[in-house]
Amino acid sequence: MRVVAGIDAGATRTRAVLVSEEGVFIGRGMADRACYGADSMGAIKNSLKQALAGAMDNAILQVTTIDSIFVGIAGVVTEQDQGAVAKLVRDFPFVNKECVSIDHDIRIAHAGGLAGDEGIVVIAGTGSSCYGRDKTGMKWQAGGWQFLLDDIGSAYWISIEGMKAMVQAYDGRGRKTSLSAMLCDTLDLTTVPDIIRRLHVDGLFRSKCSMSKAEIASVAPAVLEEAACGDEVAHQIVVRGVKGLVDMVRAVAENLEIRRDDLLVTSAGGLLSGSDLMYKEFCKALSRVLPGAKLVKPRLEPVFGASLLALDMIGVSPDEKIVKSLTELLVENQ
């Protein structure tokens, strides 16, 4: 029996799953984050290997060889990036070195969310991006340019916009907002000017260094809470962020020329699933821009999307039976 592995390596954690060629779930493992360009190659290798080893250790049957592996990893963009990570994975003694594939984590989010169907996935988590594929395999991506250039609608972007609103209100340049008190509490600031030290010196956890992207992104729930409670400044941040996400979906749909009357759109990342307000605003904006689009819940997690792609690598085209089997597994574990 052949066994494949799927890995979802991101800015928060690394997860791995093992699946048989019949689509039977065998085991899973977890490790620390692995983000290409942000973490050292040694750290990335350790996280990938640890997650895989954990899945093998926890497997329901003995696994000595992984026949194919697909890794979705944040930060991978070019073929050079893919080759660098593939070289790390091929060093693992239990991996078939001829069947290793690496891509951006948005690829596995699409594969899992739509289970092989044509359509678009929008990621709104720490960062933001959007990716689509049509029935012929044509693909297009919008966003994903990282926080210095874009990342609109992401947790990082929402947090930064919330902090901007707070300091501008303090100056008298912006409207008064309940974000001021909420963010002072969230960031443990005595006064608004203390934000300079928090951002650039002490960090959120008094780490004696500037706040990381992940620490900044963790402020987003406070902004979303104030928006849900009726603060107009916070609400407008959500509206602008949602518009940016929908603009990405529109751009992908137009470039792929996907029919709009039956377009499937799914999501990944915690923002749209974790905030009722953001989800509702996204649905409203999407219906205005792409009236025929249908927002659907992801069928499978990204890590299982990676396993579907790994199955395809050994000539097993994942059918509805396999997808249903993995979907039922997730329902049982909820």
Image (spheres, rainbow, N blue to C red):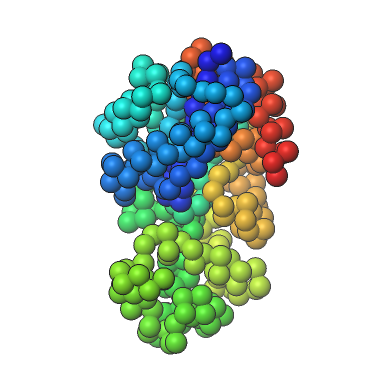
**On screen, 110 above or below 215?**
above
Residue 332's quadrant in the figure?
Answer: top right
Whether residue 69 is visible to the viewer of this picture, yes or no, is: yes
Q: For this rendering, which residue is in front, 130 or 75? A: 75
Residue occupying the point 28% across, 32% down: 84
Q: Quadrant of the C terminus?
A: top right
Residue 293, by quadrant, is: top right
Q: How many marks?
A: 0
Is residue 142 visible to the viewer in this orientation of the structure?
Answer: no
In the displayed structure, 10 sits above or below 252; it is below
The residue positioned 63% from the left and 51% from the top of the image is 273
At 51% from the left and 60% from the top, the residue drawn is 240
Task: Give coordinates of residue 321: x percent, y percent.
Answer: 69, 20
Which is nearer the eye, 31 or 225?
31
In percent of width and height, residue 150 lies at: 38, 53
Q: Is residue 9 left or right of residue 22?
A: left
Q: Quadrant of the N terminus?
A: top right
Q: Position of residue 18 (x, y in %)?
A: 54, 28
Q: Position of residue 37 (x, y in %)?
A: 30, 46
Q: Residue at x 62, y 56 (%)?
A: 274
State whether residue 279 is above or below residue 212.
above
